[in-house]
Structures are given as structure tokens and as C-alpha cells.
Amino acid sequence: MIKTRFIFNPRSGHNAKNPYLLERTRAFIRERSLDADVVLTERPRHATELARRAVDEGCKLVVAIGGDGTLNETAAGLVGTDAVFGLVPCGSGNGLGRHLGIPGPGKGAFRTLVEGRIREIDTGQVNGIPFFNAMGLGFDAEIADRFNHLTRRGLAAYVRTTLGTLFDYRAETCFIRNGVASLSTTAFLLTVANSDQYGNDCFIAPGASVDDGQLDLTVIKRATVFNAAPLAARLFLKSIDGSRSVTRLRGSHFTIWRAAPGLIHTDGETHRTGSTLEITVLPRSLRIMVPSGA
């Protein structure tokens, strides 16, 4: 029987509003007679510590129950190990879960942990900070920072935050190199994606794959009162490539220079970094459980 550890974030928005989920997890362990236990996160970055400890203690499956931040922290502790990462996505976006076809709690997420299959996926890194779905700078980092300070989240809150910031934000100039091409551009928003979407079926990198050893860079050069609505529509219609305001690059390594240090986000968690960003990929470095038919 596989030794398993569940890492539960009680402060994740969905988990805080649905305290029954912790008991549902424990009931699942009893019903399946699993060799498993549940530990709760207590502070930022704690999930990474708990994941590494789980590996040290012989756990072969380590499961994150929470949003994108919990996903990121837990997976970060498993990169390059033989342990399998399990995900019960409970966030407001769940971009990686949607890309991989992993359902939410109550829709088959727990069943996937015992009936699914293992898939090896890539890990992105920006200045040594791991990400599994997407990292970005510019407008989306600003939105992530504001969104993380909200007491109520969800798609509606995200839309309100976006609209409230949209026309006050000023694009920055970036110089980008990926070993094949160089690009100097204004960047209202710059995303380097491992999967194809942010979450909520908002596709920032249509065609991206999590196991091709490549990362997909998307630059939205400008957003104005005239093109904002068409750009938003294209994100949900998987047609962002068709906009003249958008540039796409693909590669296993990017260097980005900007005029000054500033915010970035990794899977929605914000950091302040220097003006130079080195972005690399670790091919097939994370083993994750996905539905057998995905």
C-alpha cells in the first residue's frame, strides 16, 4: 500500500468556506483504508517544507488540497523526486488542473488519486523560483498582487479587480532573448506559460503543453479602451494569437531585461525581483497523478 500524505491549506479560499472538505479527506482515507494522514499548513511556504518532509518519511504520493499557491508550494518540494504529486484543486482559477483534466472536489478529484495514471510534466523556473502553470510580469503580476489581498475571491472578484486596474496601468519596456530570437517590446502583460491557460478557461498560450520541454511566452504589447474587450474575448476563445497587439515566442530558456526591479508572479504568488529574469525549464521533472482518460 502506497504511503500517502495530504497537505491541506485551511486558509485557501475554498477550504475556508467549506470546512467539511477536511473531514471529507479523512473519510476518504478511512473508506479506502489508505496508509495516509493529513497535515495542515500554518504559514506561507510551509507546504514546501511539509512536502519535503513527506518524501523524507517515505511517502510515495503527496497531495495538495488548496488553490494555486498550495499547488505551487507542494509541487516545489517534489520536483526531481520519485514521489507522485496529487492535486485536489480548490482555487479560484485552477489553471494547471483544468489543463490536465483534473476535476475539483466532489467531481472526481479524490477518485483520481487512486484510479488515475502518472504523467511526467515540466517545471519552469524564474531566477530559481519554480512555477508549474505560469509566471508573469506587468499587468497580471499587479492583478495577482491585488487579488491576493482580497478577502473574497472567485471569478467575479478577479474581473472587478482587473477592470478597476486596467486603464491606470502603464506598460513597461522589455528586451527578450530566447537563444533563437531577440525582441524589444512594450509589455502591458508578459506571461511565460507551461500550460495553455491561466484558469477559468482563459487561454493565454493556446497550444502549450506541459511535457514538451518548452515554455510559451506571450506578450500583450498594449491594452486600450478600444482593444481591451476584443483581447478579453480572444483569451476565452483561444484566439489570442490573432491579435496584432500580441507576440508569441517558444523556447526552453528566456532572458528578460526590464528597466527596473519589480513584481512578478509564479502561479499567482507574487515576488519582487531584480530587473533581469532568467527563465528555464526542467523537462518532465514532476510526476503528477491525472485521470486515466485524460
Image: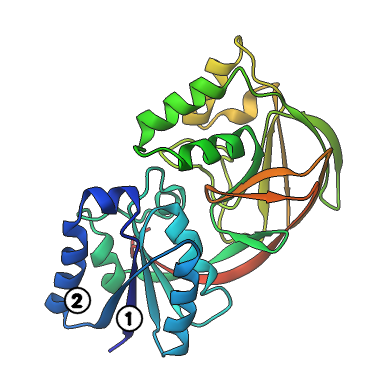
Direction top: furthest residue: 226
Residue 203: % across, % down: 51, 37
First in sequence: mark 2 vs mark 1: 1
Q: Position of residue 93 (x, y in %)?
A: 41, 43
As drawn, is 214 to the left or to the right of 62? right
Contact between marks 2 and 1 (CB within 8 A): the answer is yes
Label 1: how many Cα within 10 Å (few below 14, some 14–19, many 20+)? many
Q: How many marks?
A: 2
- Can I make out residue 191 in this image? no
The secondary element bearing badge 2 is classed as: helix
Residue 141 visible, this orientation? yes
Viewer-nearest residue: 20 or 255: 20
Q: Does residue 5 appear left or right of residue 195 in this picture?
A: left
- Element under disc 1: strand
Q: Quadrant of residue 87?
A: bottom left
Q: In the picture shown, does residue 38 fall above or below 176?
A: below
Q: Amino acid at mark 1?
A: Thr
Corner quadrant of residue 42: bottom left
Residue 204 locus on image (x, y percent): 56, 37
* Residue under pointer 1: 4
Mark 2 lies on residue: 29
Instruction: Please provide percent x and percent y for residue 206.
Output: 56, 40
Q: Quarter of the image for the C terminus: give it.
A: bottom left
